[in-house]
Image (tube, rainbow, N blue to C red):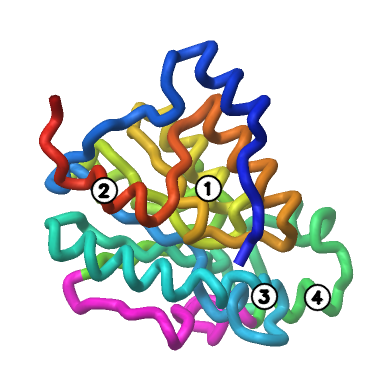
Amino acid sequence: MHDVEIGQDIIERVLARRGRVHLFESIDPAKTAFVVVDMQNTFVEPGAPAEVPVARDVVPAINELADELRKRGVRVIWVNHQNAGAPGATDWEGFFTHIVGDPEKVDAMLENMAEGGHGTLLWKDLDVDSGDLRVTKNRYSAFTSGASRLERVLRSLGIENLILAGTKTNVCVESTGRDAMALDFKVVMVSDACAASSDREHLGTLETFLQQFGDVMTKVEVLEIVGRKAN
């Protein structure tokens, strides 16, 4: 688990801007989705091509949130990354050529995250309910144009609020959260249900997100406000 705390200077900056740290005093469950990003074998399984070891540590928090939020009427949506294109190929050439680079790693990731590939499957220790929804994406953000059907699903369900968890905090979770805010969703990132490759990267995203894109809360804080009657 990441051992971090948002800096007091950040808290003071947020207070100076809006007079309070947290954006939301209550969240309507009927208008809320718990969106879990990329908790799949490619990122969670030991030895996987893009392993994030801390992702295994946040599984209990994700399971607890999913279970309790379902009981309150929140929709749970699992968003997984899956390559677009023919087997062994991709339509995201720039990422694989320049960001990944190493041909052996590229080949391993393409195979692992091909449609139906082992890497696209949810990690075995996650508690998934038959009523949960599943969405695949092929870019960091599930809201990138053409990357997934997530926005259409959310709009069709009347969802206005997103509670985000998953991995990596500073890549796909952050990218999805930023774009969600730009589309006028109200977004909460759950600090102890997200995982990055290092504490520094994790904390950097939390501090930026709290200031500019949405709210950052712990699992306990989220459960305190979901379903609470607004004043």
Query: Which residue is under mark 1?
Result: 141
Looking at the rendered structure, the kind of residue marked 1 is Ser
The residue type indicated by label 2 comes to Glu
For the residue pair 68 and 132, the one nearer the viewer reads as 68
Q: Quadrant of residue 25?
A: top left
Q: Which residue is mark 2?
A: 224
Secondary structure of residue under mark 2:
helix
Q: Which residue is mark 3?
A: 53
> Principal SS element in the magenta part?
loop
Task: Check the picture and name the quadrant holding the C terminus.
Answer: top left
Q: At 26% from the left edge and 48% from the top edge, which residue is drawn?
A: 224
Q: CA distance from mark 3 to mark 4?
A: 18 Å
Of tags 1 and 2, the one toward the viewer is: 2
Three-letter code for the amino acid on which mark 4 is drawn: Lys
Report the residue marked by disc 4: 105
Kindly identify the residue that appears in the image at 45 percent across and 32 percent down. Answer: 214
Q: Secondary structure beneath disc 3?
A: loop
